[in-house]
Image (cartoon, rainbow, N blue to C red):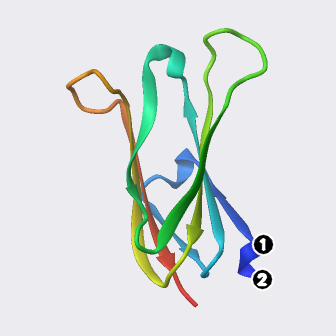
């Protein structure tokens, strides 16, 4: 199997779990987000040094003003070891705990 062409997709159900990747394998994280409410996901840990963030995007629904969409991040496993991806869902201007959190442990093995 060529790891460069394998994509592991993870979502909210993977919160607090551990995943295993091979070097150069890609990981896509998709979480629901509704920026019209002021809430957005903030990346606090990128999985470094074992992962590198390659892309962040937001997929809005095709119809329905004020409806949420999906925030996506694409990470690449760049070296063997263990890293952590951590995000918080909050309003940037509020000084209070996040509404939600997401943590994922990434283990990169040969």
Task: Find residue 36 and report its horizontal and vertical position in percent.
Answer: 52, 15
Q: Which residue is drawn at the image coordinates 54% and 76% (left, top)?
A: 78
The answer to whether one can see residue 99 in this image is: yes
The image quadrant of residue 57 is top right
Helix, strand or loop at label 2? It is loop
Q: Is residue 98 above or below residue 19?
A: above
Q: How far across and down, in percent of the image, does residue 43 sit?
A: 41, 46
Q: Residues within 10 Å of mark 1 (few under 14, many from 20)?
A: few
In the picture of the structure, the residue carrying the numbered disc 2 is 2
Q: Position of residue 24 (x, y in %)?
A: 64, 77
Left or right, residue 2 beside residue 74: right
Q: Based on the displayed image, in which of its 4 quarters is residue 54 positioned? A: bottom right
Mark 2–mark 1 contact, CB under 8 Å?
Answer: yes
Q: In this view, does 89 lie to the left or right of 24?
A: left
Residue 64, image x and y in percent? 72, 11
Residue 90 shown left or right of residue 7 in the figure: left
Residue count near mark 2 (Cα–Cα under 10 Å), binned few <14, some 14–19, many ≥20: few
What residue occupies the far front of the structure in this picture?
A: 54
* Picture residue at 57% right of the left edge, 34% below the top: 32
Residue, x 20% and y 25% (percent of image)? 95
Q: Marks 2 and 1, Cα distance to the nearest angstrom? A: 6 Å
Q: Name the residue under label 1.
A: 5
User: Left or right: where does residue 70 sit relative to residue 43?
Assistant: right
Image quadrant in which you'd find residue 39? top left
Q: Residue at 54% of width from left, 86% of height from top?
A: 109
Q: Is mark 1 on a helix, strand or loop?
A: helix
Among all residues in the image, which is located at the extreme top?
Answer: 65
Counting labels gives 2
Question: Dividing the image into 4 quarters, which one contains the N terminus?
Answer: bottom right
Image height check: is 55 above or below 107? above
The C terminus - image quarter: bottom right
């Amino acid at each position: 199997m060529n790891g460069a062409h394998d994509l592991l997709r993870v979502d909210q159900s993977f919160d607090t779990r551990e995943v295993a990747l091979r070097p150069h394998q890609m990981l896509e994280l998709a979480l629901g987000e509704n920026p019209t409410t002021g809430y957005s996901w903030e990346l606090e840990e990128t999985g470094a040094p074992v992962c590198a963030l390659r892309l962040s995007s937001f997929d809005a629904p095709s119809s329905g003003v004020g409806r949420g969409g999906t925030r996506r991040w694409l990470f690449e496993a760049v070296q063997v070891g263990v890293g952590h991806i951590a995000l918080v869902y909050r309003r940037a201007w509020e000084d209070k705990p996040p509404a939600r959190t997401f943590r994922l442990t990434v283990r990169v093995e040969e």
